[in-house]
Image (cartoon, rainbow, N blue to C red):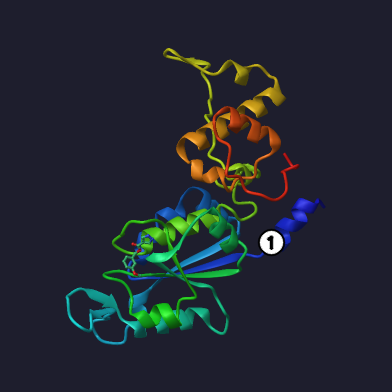
Amino acid sequence: MTVLAICAIIQAMLTIDIVTIFPEMFDSPFNASIIKRAREKGLVSIRAHNLRDWATDKHKTTDDTLYGGGGGMLMKPEPLFAAVEAIRGECSVPTILLTPQGRLFNQQVAQELAQESRLLFICGRYEGVDERVRQHLATDELSIGDYVLSGGEVAAMVVVDAVVRLLPGALGYEHAAAEDSHATGLLEGPHYTRPPKFRAWEVPEILTSGHHARVAAWRRRQALMRTLARRPDLLARARLDAQDRRWLAELGYNGPFAHGQIDSER
Ligand code: JCQ
């Protein structure tokens, strides 16, 4: 048996639980494409739970008015604590509240979450959740960006998608995740497919030349140029070798650079 086949067998499943008042929102996005295939392969199990199942009154109330006035509604603590504690059981499970006030989600956070065996997401609605949920139930608060959504559900979908595609075996092309923008620390340069000429626009000659080393150098240079033009902030943290730095210097960028090992893997 190959090493790859053995790793595939011992690969533990990631279990994701989501607490929401709209579990049906997750049906379509988690039953298509990469996530669907990862579930079918047994790489991940995803369950969206209806918070109302843990509401105790006859109207299944999950929200209430703000103390101190001012209007607006907040998620009540009791159903959220009951739901999360029931789903956790005796296990300690990273419990993530999606909120504009959380730490900013990025590829590095996705890689960290992909190492866990379980994740639990709390999706808030209305003006948010009672402060006791943040302080005594959530173990982490994540934001997917500086804007306000109508609830945490779409943010949870973003995080789950970014995490699941990192699980070994989730992508058809195994190296794809490692070569992504943000995994390399640089934006990707331009990509082309057939035809070689579409309308007036030709594919750069280097790509059809068959010179693999020159193609690799061209791609790297394009990635550096695009990153410098669009996201120069990323260059300060990217892993760059001496050649990269020479190219960037030609383009007028002379730092700052991340220190540490000069990358010899490339
Ligand atoms: C997540 N970026 C924006 C909205 C309050 C828990 O409290 C609240 C949650 C939300 C939903 O999440 C977002 C969000 N990342 O809006 C208001």
Ligand 1 has an atom within 8 Å of the beta carbon of the residue at disc 1: no
* Count of labels in the image: 1
Q: Is residue 54 visible?
A: no
* Picture layout, residue 21 above or below residue 37: below
Rendered residue at 63%/46% (across/down): 178
* Image quadrant assignment for residue 256: top right
* Picture layout, residue 228 above or below residue 68: above
Rendered residue at 62%/63% (across/down): 115
Residue 183 coordinates in the image, percent (x, y): 59, 47
In what element is the residue under mark 1?
loop
Q: Residues within 10 Å of mark 1 (few under 14, many from 20)?
A: some
Q: Label 1 amino acid?
A: Gln
The residue pinned by badge 1 equals: 11
Query: In which quadrant of the rendered image does the C terminus lie?
Result: top right
Rendered residue at 72%/44% (across/down): 262
Depth order, front residue of 98/236 = 236
Depth order, front residue of 212/16 = 212
Residue 36 coordinates in the image, percent (x, y): 51, 53
Residue 134 coordinates in the image, percent (x, y): 41, 77
